[in-house]
Image (spheres, grey):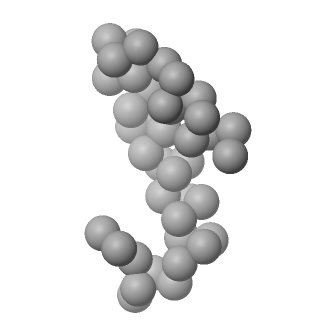
Amino acid sequence: MKERDFCKQTPHSYFSTTSSICSKRLLQIRNRIFPTSEKPL
């Protein structure tokens, strides 16, 4: 997915500034795939 690829390809310094955005997007994607009660996290 685009969000995950973007998060993965960003440099670490830049990633740290956008980590909250990336994690929010990834959480939304993950919630779509897994039920909230069955999340791997």
Residue 41 versus residue 17: which sits nearer the camera? 41
At x 53%, y 65%, the residue is 30
Locate residue 39 relative to residue 6 in the image: left or right. Answer: left
- Quadrant in the rendering for residue 28: bottom right
Q: Is residue 31 above or below residue 6?
A: below
Q: 21 and 8: which one is in front?
A: 8
Query: Would you place residue 15 above or below residue 1 in this image?
Result: above
Residue 25 in percent (x, y) is at: 55, 48
Who's the residue at 40% across and 22% down the image?
Answer: 15
Taking 33 as reference, is 41 left or right?
Answer: left
Q: Is residue 11 above or below residue 16?
A: above
Q: Residue at x 60, y 73 (%)?
A: 33
Residue drawn at the location 41% of the way across and 14% of the way down: 11
**Which residue is outermost to the right?**
2
The image position of residue 29, as x and y in percent, is 59, 60
**Residue 5, image quadrant:** top right
Q: Report x, y in % for residue 37.
A: 40, 87
- The quarter of the picture where the C terminus appears is bottom left
